Image (spheres, rainbow, N blue to C red):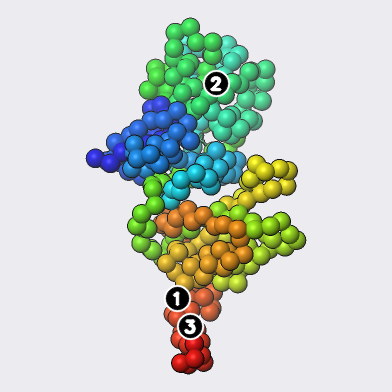
């Protein structure tokens, strides 16, 4: 049976995402996102399911950075998971008794309004995951009064829900991706997304525009762009892009070749079916048959001399 790594322990949102993406897979819980990706890189697991983007907080930087460096991994599937947070405590605990809360940093930032309104003096301590926080609160003698996590984590670790749906917005969604070591790409479905990382050749005026033009001139809509520091000094950045379409489609393939020409390096992170099933609008002159027809026309002009 195939095995997939994820941010554990049992009861995380990552586990929920994995169960939906690969219901039959064996699950390998890891202590952080980097460890889950490394398990996939080393072959201890066939792949991993990791959070990539949140509708309220944006890119999950730990995942973005891990995918940008080291042994390459590619995305083969994505899932949009609605995330609902609960305040979880040992049975008998009341809201007014809660002084110390533990949770994952992403959950903390998504529940800021509730904490400010209901628990203005609370200390919030960071945990490796929401389920690790719930597990910690369940331990006898735990210094924490409550955890913020999924209701299922509360059930798993014998905690009660002191408050439910405490996120700043009730429609928050986290985008999870399933990654594997590079291999055969998922087939195009007509409603696909392509992810990549581009590293600038040199810092110059219009460097970002040079990259964006590769997409724009081929009628490709971007669905996410994110700059991340290279670590080489202030002002040094590389870029994550998600765009509509599949690398097997001419316009996307040409855009990636164009990026390869103008960048120091481009890391392909995969082409895979979009979870929302939205198909791109193909602008006139950018369909596969139009690229093929233009290539034939060029061959005819060049004749035998080419
Ligand atoms: O701690 C978890 O339960 C996770 O799966 C991680 C994570 C994240 O990193 O964003 C996933 C979804 C929620 O946005 C909060 C936490």
Q: Which residue is disc 1 drawn over? A: 288
Q: Number of labelled discs?
A: 3
What residue lies at 51% left-to-right and 54% top-to-bottom? Answer: 267
Q: Earlier in the sequence, mark 2 or mark 1?
A: 2
Q: Which mark is residue 53?
A: none
Q: CA distance from mark 2 to mark 1?
A: 52 Å
Q: Which of these two is toward me, 103 or 30?
A: 30
Residue 234 figure quarter: top right
Q: Which mark is residue 295?
A: 3
Q: CA distance from mark 2 to mark 3?
A: 59 Å
Task: Between label 2 and label 1, give the one nearer the viewer.
Answer: 1
Q: Is disc 2 surrounded by few (<14), some (14 to 19) or many (20+) residues within 10 Å?
A: many
Q: Earlier in the sequence, mark 2 or mark 3?
A: 2
Specify the farthest residue to the right: 205
What residue lies at 53% left-to-right and 67% top-to-bottom? Answer: 257
Asked if 174 appears above or below 163 in the picture, the reply is below
Q: Which residue is disc 2 drawn over? A: 102
Specify the farthest residue to the left: 1
Specify the farthest residue to the front: 305
Beta carbon at label 2 within 8 Å of ligand 1: no
What residue lies at 58% left-to-right and 64% top-to-bottom? Answer: 259
User: Tag 1, which secondary structure?
Assistant: helix
């Amino acid at each position: 049976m195939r095995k997939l790594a994820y941010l554990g322990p049992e009861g995380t949102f990552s586990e929920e995402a994995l169960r939906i993406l690969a219901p039959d897979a064996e699950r390998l819980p890891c202590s952080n996102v980097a460890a889950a990706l490394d398990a996939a890189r080393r072959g201890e697991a066939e792949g991993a399911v990791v959070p990539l983007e949140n509708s309220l907080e944006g890119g999950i930087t730990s995942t973005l950075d891990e995918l940008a460096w080291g042994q390459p991994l590619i995305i083969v599937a994505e899932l949009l998971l609605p995330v609902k947070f609960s305040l979880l405590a040992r049975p008998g605990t009341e809201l007014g008794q809660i002084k110390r809360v533990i949770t994952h940093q992403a959950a903390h930032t998504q529940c800021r309004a509730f904490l400010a309104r209901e628990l203005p003096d609370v200390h919030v301590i960071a945990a490796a995951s929401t389920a690790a926080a719930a597990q910690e609160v369940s331990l006898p003698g735990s210094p924490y009064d409550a955890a913020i996590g999924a209701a299922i984590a509360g059930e798993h670790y014998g905690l009660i829900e002191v408050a439910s749906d405490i996120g700043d917005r009730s429609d928050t969604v986290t985008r999870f991706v399933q990654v594997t070591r590079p291999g055969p790409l998922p087939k195009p479905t007509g409603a696909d997304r392509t992810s990549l990382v581009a590293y600038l050749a040199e810092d110059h005026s219009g460097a970002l525009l040079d990259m964006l033009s590769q997409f724009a001139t081929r009628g490709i809509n971007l669905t996410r762009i994110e700059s991340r520091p290279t670590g080489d000094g202030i002002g040094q950045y590389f870029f994550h892009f998600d765009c509509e379409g599949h690398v097997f489609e001419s316009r996307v393939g040409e855009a990636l070749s164009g990026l390869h020409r103008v960048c120091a390096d481009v890391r392909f992170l995969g082409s895979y079916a979009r979870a929302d099933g939205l198909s791109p609008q193909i602008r006139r002159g950018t369909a596969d048959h139009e690229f093929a027809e233009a290539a034939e026309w060029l061959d005819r002009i060049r004749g035998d001399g080419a």
